[in-house]
Amino acid sequence: DSGVTQTPKHLITATGQRVTLRCSPRSGDLSVYWYQQSLDQGLQFLIQYYNGEERAKGNILERFSAQQFPDLHSELNLSSLELGDSALYFCASSVGGRDMFFGPGTRLTVL
Amino acid sequence: DQQVKQNSPSLSVQEGRISILNCDYTNSMFDYFLWYKKYPAEGPTFLISISSIKDKNEDGRFTVFLNKSAKHLSLHIVPSQPGDSAVYFCAASDSGGSNYKLTFGKGTLLTVNP
């Protein structure tokens, strides 16, 4: 158990819909990272938050957004969903150092 | 452009023997490297890391070697156990500010046979 929690574990929705994925980092970790793992792309960095502020963006679509709240939990919002958005979405946290710990992931299926 | 490459999609090893997983990178700005193990339907589990100022780091059965001039790192698992069977990901980061985002390889499936 990494100490990073993610909900829900599974999510099935239809194209065009909007979903919210939630992540609670390890206690004391200020940085939250979101990654997407699809079948053919491997693990891709989406976005990072540090203590409530967006710190870096990766290959994140404009239809996707995220935020980190004062209690340090983070939410990833995915809208206008397409079939190709089906993937595993992982949240990771770190205290500010280099070793990153991942949550169990949310499996999103878009039908 | 794949900056972190794991050229072997799979590796099969006998229990008790050494497993060697390899990783190459192209970005000379990478200065920190990590290995993760991943089981199906679970998140990646951190195994071991190494800074570019070192050439070796050891933690129990796991040792990571870094060859900066060759832009190559390897993970050695000795002795290998059936429970080590999983996908192993190599990841790298650079010290760009406090953004330590990881760039991952595509993984190597390790199978340890009893």
Image (cartoon, rainbow, N blue to C red):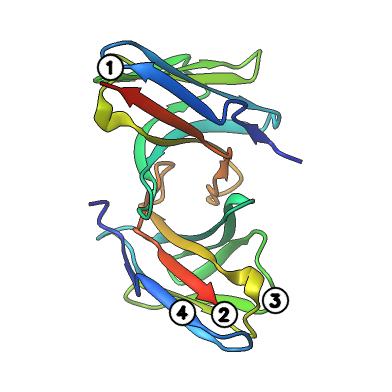
| Marks 2 and 3 belong to one chain | yes
Q: Which mark is residue A100?
A: none
Q: Residue at x 53, y 50 (%)?
A: B98
Tag 1: residue type?
Answer: Glu
Q: Mark 1 near mark 2, Cβ–Cβ under 8 Å?
A: no
| Marks 3 and 4 belong to one chain | yes
Give the x, y percent position of residue B109: 46, 33
Circle 2 Cα neighbour tier, 10 Å, few/some/many (<14 / 14–19 / ≥20) = few
Q: Which mark is residue A12?
A: 4
Q: Residue at x 67, y 60 (%)?
A: A59
| Marks 1 and 4 belong to one chain | no
Tag 3: residue type?
Answer: Glu
| Chain bearing mark 1 | B
Vertical placement of A1 versus A64: above or below?
above
Q: Is residue A79 left or right of residue B64?
A: right
Give the mark nearest the N terminus, 3 or 4.
Answer: 4
Q: Which residue is mark 2?
A: A111
